[in-house]
Amino acid sequence: MRRTSLLLMLLAAPAWAQTAPPAEGPITCTSPVSVTDSAKSLMQRYGQEAVTDDQLFTGVEDITYQGVVLSPKAPDRRIEIGFADETMQRVSRLTLIDSKTSHWNVAGVTLGSTLAEVQKINGRPFLIREFFTDGGGFVVDWKGGTLSRPLPGGCSVSVRFGSDDHEGNPIGDRIASDKAELRKWGPVVEQIVVSFPEK
């Protein structure tokens, strides 16, 4: 009887490991969060590693929203999740923010990625909105590169660059990522937003 119980435990262990939610790696339209997730399903799946928060920062002015945070005590694993409405029944977006680095990546882009690294992934130069303005630092045009295309499943990617250096930043509403002045200033990815398609 004891041998049979042990065998069943050994056989069940790999299946359990496969269903454990990921804590790092590539973010897709279905992992670690899918559009069909609700706040309730995330809390059930992640347990203590998921908490609700009504003061999540959008990155634009002082606008906040209510959502769920995964890995709230580990900044480099943290994911902030927004929903389509106040009932939090359907995911609308997820955000990586407020950390210098992350164990997560979206299409190879992660927090702390440089202009050169993102341009290589995109396959061509792109345009960035003027820094230190409302919505400044966001990529406004991927110029038809890889990152302009939706991820498998229809999700879209937004990336925001920034720097702690508030002096010497290039001026202009649409700054090319391969501009020497911008490269010298050295901005890195500070925010990544994955937006899920609407119904």
Image (cartoon, helix red, strand yellow):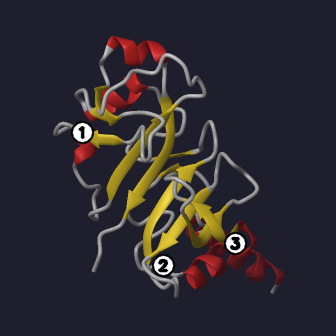
Q: Amino acid at mark 3?
A: Val
On screen, residue 112 above or below 15: above
Q: Secondary structure at mark 3?
A: strand
Question: Label 2, on which residue?
Answer: 37
Q: Amino acid at mark 1?
A: Trp
Q: Secondary structure at mark 2?
A: loop
Q: Position of residue 137 (x, y in %)?
A: 42, 37
* Residue 195 seen anywhere in this rendered image of the structure: yes
Q: Is residue 50 left or right of residue 130?
A: right
In percent of the image, x 51 and y 56: which residue is there?
95
- In the rendered view of the protein, which quadrant contains the N terminus? bottom right
In percent of the image, x 59 and y 66: which residue is there?
21
Q: Is residue 37 left or right of residue 44?
A: left
First in sequence: mark 3 vs mark 2: 2
Disc ID at residue 51: 3
Q: Is residue 157 left or right of residue 81?
A: left
Mark 3–mark 2 contact, CB under 8 Å? no
Nearer to us of marks 2 and 1 is 1
* Residue 28 seen anywhere in this rendered image of the structure: no
In percent of the image, x 35 and y 51: which residue is there?
157
CA gap between label 2 and label 1 equals 29 Å
Residue 73, located in which quarter of the rendered image? bottom right
CA gap between label 3 and label 2 equals 14 Å
Q: Secondary structure at mark 1?
A: loop
In percent of the image, x 64 and y 42: which residue is there?
99
- In the rendered view of the protein, which quadrant contains the C terminus? bottom left
Q: Residues within 10 Å of mark 1 (few under 14, many from 20)?
A: many
Question: Is 120 in front, or is 1?
Answer: 120
Q: Amino acid at mark 2?
A: Asp
Disc ID at residue 142: 1
